[in-house]
Amino acid sequence: MTIKPPTDLEPQINIEPQATANRQMLFRFLPAVDALLRAAYNHAPDLSARFSPSQLTVYARSAIDNLRRQMSIETFDSKENFDATNEADLRAQLLRQAHAQLSQQIERASNSDLRRVINATGVVLHTNLGRAPLSLAARKRILEAASYCTLEYDLESGERGRRGAGVEDLLCELTNAEAAFVVNNCAAATMLILAALARDGETIISRGELVAIGGDFRIPDVMGDSGTQMREVGTTNRTTIDDYARAVNANTKLIARVHPSNYRVVGFTHTPQLAELAELARERNLILYEDAGSGALFDMSEFGLTDEPIIPDSIKAGADIVSFSGDKLLGGAQAGCIVGRENLINVLRRAPLARALRIDKLSLAALEATLESHRRGAALKDVPVLNMIAMTPNEIAQRTQTFIEPLRATLEAHGFAVEIIDGTSAIGGGSAPLTHPPTKLIALTHRKHSPAQLAHALRRDRSDMPTVIARIADNRLLLDLRTVAASEEVDLQRALIELNKLSS
Ligand SMILES: *Cc1c(COP(=O)(O)O)cnc(C)c1O
């Protein structure tokens, strides 16, 4: 609160700072909900279009309650906080403070909206920014599926069809698997597979694969919750096929291979080939399950991704079941894709957990359109994630030059220094942690404003300006066009020009 000591209060509202009775009196002058709402509507006429009257009433009550609470604390000094000389003044001041509280609440409520941002960080699968941005085709398909659609309907027979049948066919074609099934995300796929195929039995896993993926998805915990007994073998850095073989017993049901995704052990390491594990599994009548994580459908080593499992290769090597994410290297919507042997997939379909983990129609629509891009052989061009990963340093250099040169003069005139420097992008999303594709970065500094202030200004919350997320390093604001779509460049330029309005 910002208000100064009182000068000459009228007797009936002259308040001793610590006296409870007088504080009660002060409370009497707090605005009524109606009065506060009237002030709010006057100040922002669009409020009634954004919130229902009942919701605004809730916010207004809570704003007044907050103010009352602040005035109730022992150390609150009314003389320091109000300088009203009469009752009308005091009421007006209390109304202003309540209005400030209400505005804060409304701003908090508005800020929590999901909104589009321009990702200029260069992190392709940015977990906090929604991982894979969808292709145009996927966005269109979502719009179509948003109305009534053939989610579980067979047009030929006019009878009930199977949810996800189209996506399952596409997955089989693209991975050469016998059958496929899709659930809500890859974590759900892992839970379902372990619960349906290894419950009440043992699952063998290498100690080098007991990883945590994201904050809470820890493989040992997932095993426990799925009701399978985890049998760890080998060491953190070296596990041999004999380690696996020795652990097999009458209770063993499954051998799990988990891709460590966001984590690498380097140096003196060994892990058996998937084909060796497949042979062991076949001999001992066990299921071999690979949680591949990222879902690369083809070899991306030419783009620096050298140690991501390639799904058709895993099937070819003899994995019985493979799971992977729909929104990592596959570039589609959040989904858990499962491919493998038909008899096992059928067990998964019928498991009670399957219904609880099922995928919704919008994700299915986006995934279907994305997989169609893969089938057309157009994924590198049409699927944004793959397009960004495949972008050459030359391409990025040219784009960066063409993008920033028209802005350079005006930015420099407003106190900015503008450079193009060498740097690296990242894959992100827990994929390929060692891959750092070379890129060009736009580096901005300002003679008065810190990089943090510039980054904050770019994140601004305004309906008429795009929200831009940038990176800060070495005391510079960095923008990487690898993760900015060509169609977003005009908006990004607008946002940068807008920075000129910061005082220079
Ligand atoms: C990312 C990942 C998961 C979780 O996938 P979500 O789609 O985020 O649920 C599970 N396992 C591995 C190996 C992963 O890389």
Image: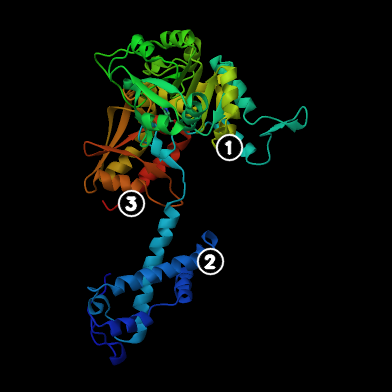
Question: Quarter containing ligand 1?
Answer: top left
User: Disc 1 marks which residue?
Assistant: 360
Q: Depth check: 369 or 355 in front?
A: 355
Q: Real-space Cα distance between discs 1 and 2?
A: 32 Å
Q: Position of residue 302 (x, y in %)?
A: 39, 14
Q: Position of residue 472 (x, y in %)?
A: 27, 38
* Dot 1 beta carbon under 8 Å from ligand 1: no
Indicate the amino acid at tag 1: Asp
Q: Quadrant of the N terminus?
A: bottom left
Circle nearer the N terminus (2, 3): 2
User: Disc 2 marks which residue?
Assistant: 54
Circle nearer the N terminus (1, 2): 2
Q: Depth check: 205 or 367 in front?
A: 205
Quarter assignment of residue 164: top right
Q: Where 337 sits versus 121, above or below?
A: above
Using residue 197 as the reference point, say whether residue 14 is left or right of it: left
Query: Would you call the spot at circle 3 few (<14 residues within 10 Å), some (14-19), or many (20 or more)?
Result: few
Quarter assignment of residue 126: top left
Q: Secondary structure at mark 1?
A: loop
Residue 119 in sight from this viewpoint: no
Report the mark closest to the observer, 3 or 1.
1
Q: Secondary structure at mark 3?
A: helix
Q: Depth check: 103 or 207 in front?
A: 207
User: Residue, x 47% and y 66% (percent of image)?
Assistant: 58
* Dot 3 beta carbon under 8 Å from ligand 1: no
Indicate the amino acid at tag 2: Ser
Indicate the amino acid at tag 3: Lys
Please report contact status of discs 3 and 1: CB closer than 8 Å, yes or no: no
Residue 59 in sight from this viewpoint: yes
Q: Where 4 sits versus 207, above or below?
A: below
User: Disc 3 marks which residue?
Assistant: 501
Q: Secondary structure at mark 2?
A: helix
